[in-house]
Image (spheres, rainbow, N blue to C red):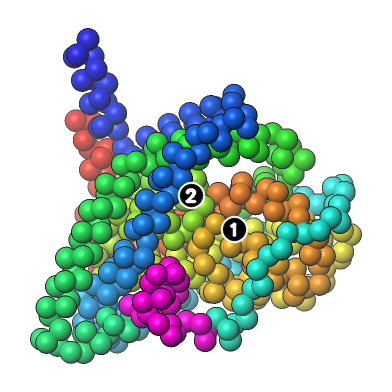
Amino acid sequence: MEQAIATQNGFWSGMPLWKKILIGMVLGTLVGAVMGPDAEILKPIGTLFINAIKMLIVPLVFCSLVVGVTSMQDTRKMGRIGLKSVLLYLGTTTVAISIGLGLGTLLTPGAGISMSVEAAPVAKEAPTLIQTLLNMIPKNPISALAAGNILQIIVFALGLGIALSLCGEKAQPAIKVFESLAEGMYKLTELVMKLAPYGIFGLMAWVAGKYGMDILLPLIKVIGAVYIGCLVHVLVVYTGLISSLGRLNPRRYLKGLLNPASVAFTTTSSSGTLPATIKAAREEMGVSKGISSFVLPLGATINMDGTALYQGVCALFIAQAFGVDLAFSDYLLIIMTSTLASIGTAGVPGAGLIMLSLVLTTVGLPMEGLAIVAGIDRILDMARTSVNVCGDLMVSILVGKSENELDESVYNQVSSESRTATA
């Protein structure tokens, strides 16, 4: 009996994390479907995991960025990497919104759906581009850290990292402190991620029990269009860029993103998935500490490919449901608005509704459409957040490759977890 238990424990401990997460997702969905609304009693398990992830975000982002900047030493190199990252992020966001609009036109998800004009949920007012730029500079860095304002934390960490690099030898003690703190955060991240299968089980049970098929069936075309678009964007656009620009095997990229994509799918937070994304970039993809510590926190803030794709599908869904004909100029306006708005939208659950309200206002579509979209927002958020995280990893790989800071021997080999399981 003891030998059987030991064998089972060894089987579970030797299993790759993504397989454990997948098992947690499937079991959680089944349990939620059986228990129905009563599955909410399992939500605290997921909440504990989410809280543990949130605990990591601010110190991990801050320490990683400071270490990433100081490790570069050359400020011109940092500017070059930043420019490459932003251009890739904005370029893929433009492609994503175009895919969303194309699918919305092709599948016509709003056709035949009777939209009620009940009061729409109150969405926070989306900040203007000028407001976003002004709010990037924290008046009080400590307040920004306490409030978890990721964009302000990034700006302060970049400024501090540059300043420490320019100080030379005098700054080495401080740099070593940040390097030690960063290593500590990486280890704490590794420990927290061991809880992922259990936390995701609780979250999926709650989602399946709360929403069930009642909310899915009437809007299956909207959900289908978003999920198809997300798959196309990852399997065609991202792998195409990995293959063409990076000259790398795209299958290795798809294998390496399984863990962070699974976490993103259930937590619906790009920032919350950041610990798993950094871990995958360094250990599975071979991206250097300097590149991953700089590019990934930046991507968690400004890369909203999945959210932009969702904007395209939902904007056309609302237009079709209300019988509003959009001109070609409206399509261009949606593309431009979604791309620019992605810069200032935080990578947290529900941020997509803020962007959608901005898009609807820009092209003059009824805000009442938010009401029905909000009903399935969590389900759509799961797919779009996964795409955001996959895009972050893709950009870190391409930037690392272009800067000769991608260890291709790590990228091309089977993960250590898989090797252990095989052994």
User: What predominant SS class does the magenta segment belong to?
Assistant: helix
Can residue 17 be seen?
A: yes
How many residues crowd mark 2 within 10 Å: few (<14), some (14–19), many (20+)? many
* Type of amino acid under label 2: Thr
Q: Which mark is residue 267?
A: 2
Image x and y of residue 128, in percent: 62, 81
Residue 301, compared with residue 195, is above or below; it is below
Of 405 and 204, nearer the camera is 204
Q: Circle 1 sits on which residue?
A: 350
Earlier in the chain: of badge 1 and badge 2, it is 2
Q: Is residue 393 left or right of residue 287?
A: right
The magenta segment: 133-157
Disc 1 versus disc 2: distance between alpha carbons? Answer: 11 Å
Of helix, strand and loop, which one carries label 1? loop
Q: Is residue 25 left or right of residue 66?
A: right
* Quadrant that contains the C terminus: top left
The residue lying at 65 percent from left, 68 percent from top is 124
How many residues crowd mark 1 within 10 Å: few (<14), some (14–19), many (20+)? some
Residue 117, compared with residue 6, is above or below; it is below
Image x and y of residue 129, in percent: 59, 82
Image x and y of residue 313, in percent: 70, 57
The residue lying at 37 percent from left, 51 percent from top is 52
Q: Is residue 76 left or right of residue 203?
A: left
* Type of amino acid under label 1: Gly
